[in-house]
Amino acid sequence: MPGFADDIPFFDEDDMPPRPAAGPSGIAARAMAARSGGHRPPDYLSGLNPEQRQAVETTEGPVLVLAGAGTGKTRVLTTRIAHILATGKAWPSQILAVTFTNKAAREMKQRIGVLVGEAVEGMPWLGTFHSIGVKILRRHAELAGLRSDFTILDTDDVIRLIKQLILADGLDDKRWPARQFAQMIDGWKNKGLAPNEIPEGDARAFGNGRGRELYRAYQDRLTTLNACDFGDLLCHPIRILRSNPDILKEYHDRFRYILVDEYQDTNTAQYMWLRLLAQRPSRMRTSDTPAVGRDAEHLLAASEDAAPATVNICCVGDDDQSIYGWRGAEVDNILRFERDFPGATVIRLERNYRSTAHILGAASHLIAHNEGRLGKTLFTEKPNPDDPKVMVHAAWDSEEEARAVGEEIEALQRKQHNLNDMAILVRASFQMREFEDRFVTLGLNYRVIGGPRFYERQEIRDAMAYFRVIANPGDDLAFERIVNVPKRGLGEAAVRQVHDASRALGVPMLEAAGRLAESDELKPKPRAALRGVAANFTRWRDLLDNTPHTELAEMVLEESGYTDMWKNDKSPDAPTRLENLKELIRSMEDYESLRSFLEHVALVMDAEQNENLDAVNIMTLHSAKGLEFDTVFLPGWEEGLFPHQRALDEGGRSGLEEERRLAYVGLTRAKKNLHLWFTSNRRIHGLWQSTIPSRFLEELPEAHIEIAETSSNYGGYGSGYGSQIGGRNPYGASRFDSAGNGSFNNSYSTPGWQRAQQNKTEATNRNWGSRSGHAVERIGYGEVDSGYGAGRTSVKGRTIDGELVAKSVTTTKSPFKVGDRVVHQKFGNGNISAIEGNKLTINFDKAGQKRVLDGFVTAA
DNA sequence: TCCCTTGTGATTTTT
DNA sequence: TCACAAGGGA
């Protein structure tokens, strides 16, 4: 089989002396000219502020760039790379640039491309930790007991595999859930721990003390399957580099410059990986470094007494934006950079180009409550006295919160603001629902970012499993997944027999299936089915090398009966699934072969997003990191939700600090307008609970915030908030309870409140039917769903003098009649119980009674 | 093999 | 409260 390793140029160009890598833009040439000829700095440096420029030009030695939110972090990274290339310090292939997400890698690549042109194509080592890990591992797979064509398992495969092991061990898989153990393994791998290195306590905590054995069995099984999980993509390379000094040296020679993005998010394994590559070999005692693991202290010890040679490593990050501690990130890595790399240059970027002075003031003041930070103060050079302050709003409950935010959004929309420039950032995804419901009612376009992703959908995984078996007949997990999908009458018993035969014969399940089908061990029916499956795969495999892979893929889905399965499926989402399968085939066109496509999917789980639609963005605070919006709404600032109770219970003080950093991330996403919300009541797990405002609200500086006049019918602050504060706030009195400073208590009579009431009435009148369709987009699903139901067109409301002209509500005759059975994409099937113009009241079988516009439903 | 009942647990999520 | 998974019964 043609190995992947062959595709990776490693010592390309090495015989030639480095020369400036000039792209078509000729930037390098101009840079050189500028250098020799005179005093003018090259173009790409102009427009950088002094600190940014220092970060770009300090190419030698270890550099830590502490880049606060909105200070031009990505710009520094990309310009730095352009600078290294333009000055001829290194070949594109000699720069290692790592990011966490594919999105970040893509963006970086694109922005470097703008600066240096095609030279960016020569940067094979620009990518995520995992994609670079794969690249290294494919080259040296045999040193990890794998072949270079190993498969990368996704979480789903891993859980199924672990479940088999747990059952094989005679354990109860309900008492010891596979999912939980998968997370434990992931945690250990994040720390770079092999089975023999995990703490005794951890080992005993699972499966009646069988944790270590199970972990070991899991690793053995992966080796047998010639497979890896995500953690292995880091751990195997670490082990290989550790135990093979000659290989490590190759990489040392290769990587002249190392750049790391979001350094505060690195976990221990990533840290070890970086340290290995960054440490020069001169005095590193590879031989007595222990096998991967225990913890990073071993590496530190090795490096501290060895006085590491100068390394051109540049880490960029912001300790205040470290929000992934719960999945293994170690803020400590960034906090101790100077200790790790003595003589490091530390550059602070504090000049913020994003937000107003009020927003920055609020964010800085909040984050200052954290201890153990490196300390940065963001500032802006252009404070504008007219900028609005950060608004703090109260609502009675989440429904009112959603309604009020919706009104604010519509008000902004009337002022010609784009929905794309607005975002609602929530702490937990259950909060999204209320907003979605409200926006569906309003007919307001929105998109949800995050959530289940395209490649994680059932139909996509099934299809991929077929492709995987074709590319790699030894992929038993994939084979098991689809052997009876669509249903072929191969039940549990038959699959077990195949499994046993596979073990007994020492061959993959597919081959075992083929042989079983020729024997008399099975009943005629399953035997015929198995024979069919085996014959199909043999045939498809023969076509692999001389059929275009998209054609083959289509053929496979047809001939296996998979597409028919969905065509015959009557559930409402079956058409979407077929659509997704088509999309899958389409996306395969961008790849050369089935194998390169599979590799891509294993590493890049997200799909491209569609930004053409003007829609409000809804996402979690976590997924908002790195983004910015003109207007940001932060709902749910209540104790227990934000900071989240579980973070407090499990993380104690550091948990609280991480929550505070999350709040800081949220605040600093806003460029111009920032609205914080809290409610007095919230339903949690179905129970109404009265809540108290988040302590974070009290940590905001008064100078930069304004308490919004309530627009509530229910008396938000007055009855709910104010009254609770008196006795029950365990965190001490809030400055919000005194009646003095912009208090909530007398806001009912203010002009603002009256105005708000006025607006509210207007808004309510306008809501129904102002737009006849609206679009909902789920990014990551790879699909754009314009409107629930029939109308695939989105009719925008027309605006005259800032007022939306409602499309007539009552004069439109609905095509439905009472009693009709209809389908709604979100709510499912239901019967119409009342019709008023084009508004339908429908009793949904599952979702209960809802009022929806007729455009959103189709006859069942 | 499918459908309905029952039980459980319910932050954040990339690769 | 609600969503999803798993087990039992037809």
Image (cartoon, coloured by chain):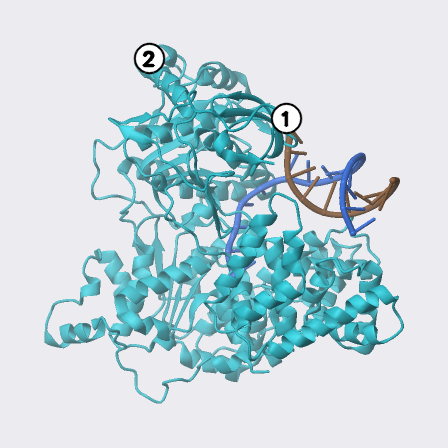
Chain colours: A cyan, B blue, C brown
Mark sitting earlier along the chain (2/1) = 1
Is residue A709 at all visible to an observer of this figure? yes
Residue A546 location (% of width, % of height)? 55, 80
User: Amino acid type of disc 1?
Assistant: Leu
Residue reaching furthest left? Answer: A38
Residue A750: name its quadrant: top left
Find disc 1 in the rendering and name its residue. Answer: A687
Image quadrant containing the C terminus of chain A:
top right
| Quadrant in which residue A406 is drawn | top left
Residue type pointed to by label 2: Thr
Parent chain of label 1: A
- Residue for point 51% across, 36% down: A432
Residue A658 in the figure: left or right of residue A254: right
Q: Nearer the viewer, residue A94 or A468?
A: A468
In this rendering, position of residue A457 left or right of residue A767? right
Measured in 3D between alpha carbons, the distance from the residue under mark 2 to the one under mark 1, in whole angstroms, is 34 Å
Q: State the image coordinates of residue A196 (x, y, percent, origin top left).
A: 70, 67
Instruction: Tell me residue A647's x, y (percent).
Output: 56, 41
Q: SS for tag 2?
A: loop
Q: Residue at x 81, y 76 (%)?
A: A515
Residue density around tag 1, few if under 14, some if 14–19, many if 20 or more, within 10 Å: few
As drawn, A472 above or below A102: below
Which residue, given by chain and number where applicable, does mark 2 sit on? A750
- In contact (CB < 8 Å): disc 2 and disc 1: no
Q: Is residue A85 above or below residue A346?
A: below
